[in-house]
Image: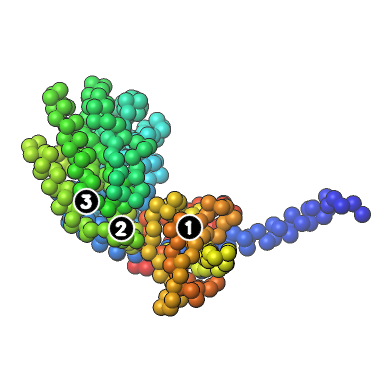
């Protein structure tokens, strides 16, 4: 008998696989975890608290943090504006009830077609950080208002955003002067101090730099009027942070110091600060293994199924388990895929109950932001992280 499978046997095998495949695609319906518990009401409350802390500043929720449609609708109904970074986010914000004038397109590098798409829907405020990008905006969205993003150190944040984007203040002056000379409105400056910024004073230096840009533009006869203070406002992650009121007070003091006259209008782009604390990722232990002197705990959620921000252990979530209450010990926490990068915390192990076993539940707190949006189907066949609304 030939070792090779015959054509007829192959056809029968494919037929059997076809009859089973619908079951393979229903795993999310039968597997209870992982999923994100999302409290939309809590997110709206956080938005209102941030708006109160920054009472002279317009809040634009960063859709990228969590684009759940019911969340966007609730925030729009509460008066929130939106920060968008792609055509899909533009569309989602408008479908949620926002007006085009309530959107800031903050991604500094965009496809020319995406610029035209947003402009065609009425989005008029866009962020750039280079002359090359400003030239694209002038061609694809004539008459648009532009903010030039300046770089920051990112010091004090858990996830620095200082490398990929940002011009120098001198370059920002050149960009905005060119914009004004080519039919665009030189609206002002934007910056971002890094995600999960733990130092309320981190906004002072970029506000001072922005003031220099504004002064240089005014000396050239231009009238910039808008300062985008970016995001970075924190959630309740491991290590703690000052309350939001401290951030509002520090920013207000910096604005008064560096803009004693001609104070610009201001906006912020929070994502994590609005939605992170409204979410809890619920996972199940799928294995506990001893490797020498090290205990490894494997979850059914990992880097490729919602927890990408644990890469390099940048973001450290607080953990609760169904076995809490007894003695704890250090362990490495890892995800379910076969990729060796799917390890959450190894360099600095977490402490979990020594009694933790397969089937126990592990809850990762303050995971409402940057989890469902980074979870995609396909890697090892694992499903995207599902959302369950709790309000």
Q: Which residue is mark 3?
A: 200
The residue positioned 83% from the left and 52% from the top of the image is 5
Considering depth in this image, is 72 or 189 the residue closer to the camera?
A: 189
Q: Is residue 350 visible?
A: yes
Q: Disc 3 and disc 1: Cα gap in Å? A: 29 Å
Question: Tag 2 or tag 1, which sits nearer the N-term?
Answer: 2
How is the structure coloured here? rainbow
Position of residue 80 measured from the top left corner of the image (x, y, whole percent): 25, 52
Instruction: Decide which of 307, 143 is in the foreground and name it.
Output: 307
Name the residue: 43% across, 78% down.
326
Residue plotted at (33% across, 40% down)? 162
Q: Does dot 1 land on a helix, a strand or a loop?
A: strand
Q: Which mark is residue 346?
A: 1
Determine crowd level at label 3: few under 14, some 14-19, many 20+ residues with C-alpha closer than 10 A.
many
> Tag 1: Cα neighbours inside 10 Å, few (<14), some, or many (≥20)?
some
Q: Is residue 92 left or right of residue 245?
A: right
> Residue 293: x and y, percent?
54, 65
Label 3 with label 1: CB-CB less than 8 Å: no
Front: mark 2 or 3: 3
Q: Is residue 251 above or below residue 236?
A: above
- Which residue is denoted by mark 2 in the rendering? 235
Q: Is residue 67 left or right of residue 240?
A: right
Give the answer, above or below, for where 11 lies relative to 387.
above
Where disc 3 sits, the SS reads: helix
The quarter of the rendered structure image containing the C terminus is bottom left
The CA span between labels 1 and 2 is: 22 Å
Q: Secondary structure at mark 2?
A: loop
Residue 192 lies, in percent from the top left, at 28, 42
């Amino acid at each position: 008998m030939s070792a090779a499978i015959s054509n007829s046997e192959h056809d029968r095998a494919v037929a059997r696989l076809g009859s089973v495949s619908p079951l393979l695609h229903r795993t999310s319906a039968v597997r209870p975890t992982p999923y994100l518990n999302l409290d939309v009401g809590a997110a709206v409350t956080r938005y209102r608290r941030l708006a109160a802390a920054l009472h002279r500043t317009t809040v634009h929720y960063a859709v990228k943090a969590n684009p759940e449609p019911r969340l966007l609708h609730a925030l729009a109904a509460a008066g929130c504006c939106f920060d968008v970074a792609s055509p899909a986010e533009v569309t989602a914000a408008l479908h949620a009830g926002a007006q085009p004038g309530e959107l800031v397109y903050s991604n500094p590098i965009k496809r020319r077609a995406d610029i035209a798409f947003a402009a065609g829907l009425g989005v008029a405020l866009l962020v750039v950080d280079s002359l090359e990008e400003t030239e694209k905006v002038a061609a694809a969205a004539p008459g648009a208002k532009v903010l030039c993003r300046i770089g920051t150190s990112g010091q004090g944040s858990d996830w620095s955003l200082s490398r990929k984007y940002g011009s120098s203040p001198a370059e920002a002056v050149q960009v905005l002067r060119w914009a004004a000379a080519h039919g665009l409105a030189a609206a002002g400056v934007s910056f971002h101090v890094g995600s999960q910024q733990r130092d309320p004073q981190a906004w002072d230096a970029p506000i001072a730099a922005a003031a220099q840009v504004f002064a240089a533009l005014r000396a050239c006869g231009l009238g910039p009027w808008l300062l985008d203070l970016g995001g970075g406002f924190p959630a309740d992650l491991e290590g703690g942070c000052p309350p939001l009121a401290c951030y509002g007070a520090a920013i207000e003091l910096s604005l008064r110091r560096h803009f004693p006259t001609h104070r610009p209008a201001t906006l912020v782009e929070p994502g994590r600060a609005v939605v992170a604390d409204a979410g809890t990722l619920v996972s199940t232990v799928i294995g506990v293994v001893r490797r020498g002197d090290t205990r490894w705990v494997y979850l059914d959620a990992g880097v490729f199924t919602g927890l990408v921000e644990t890469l390099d252990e940048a973001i450290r979530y607080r953990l609760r388990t169904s076995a809490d209450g007894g003695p704890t010990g250090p362990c490495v926490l890892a995800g379910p895929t076969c990729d060796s990068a799917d390890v959450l915390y190894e360099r600095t192990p977490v402490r979990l109950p020594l009694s933790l076993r397969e089937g126990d539940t592990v809850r990762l707190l303050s995971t409402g932001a940057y989890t469902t949006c980074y979870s995609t189907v396909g890697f090892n066949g694992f499903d995207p992280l599902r959302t369950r609304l709790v309000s």
